[in-house]
Image: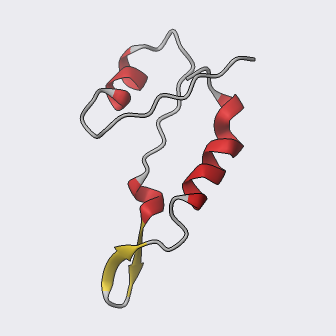
Amino acid sequence: MRTIILSAFPGMGKSYAVKHLSQYKMLDLESSEYSWIETDEGKVHNPMFPQNYIEIIKKLVYQGSY
């Protein structure tokens, strides 16, 4: 199966495409869920980012066409 990974800045239409182009099998993977963590001091950058994000992309890459 061929998979295409689309990457774009916020507000460029990625989530819109997932919702409105249902003829394609698409996944929407929000990077902020992987780049920030909650601590006692509040939200801070996750020291594991971007490697943790890359790993989840590798894991999910064949579950969608885009």
Please identify the quadrant where the C terminus is shown.
Answer: top right
Q: Residue at x 43, y 46 (%)?
A: 30
Colouring scheme applied when the structure was drawn: secondary structure
Q: Residue at x 42, y 13 (%)?
A: 21
Q: Is residue 2 left or right of residue 5?
A: right
Residue 56 in the image: x percent, y percent? 63, 50
42 vs 11: above or below: below
View extreme (top): residue: 23
Residue 52, image x and y in percent? 59, 60
Q: Residue at x 44, y 34 (%)?
A: 7
The residue shown at (48%, 60%) is 34
Q: Answer left or right for 6 relative to 17.
A: right
32 with respect to 52 (left or right): left
Rendering coords of residue 5 (x, y %) = 55, 29
> Where is 16 relative to 52, above or below?
above
Quarter the N terminus occupies = top right
Image quarter of residue 10: top left
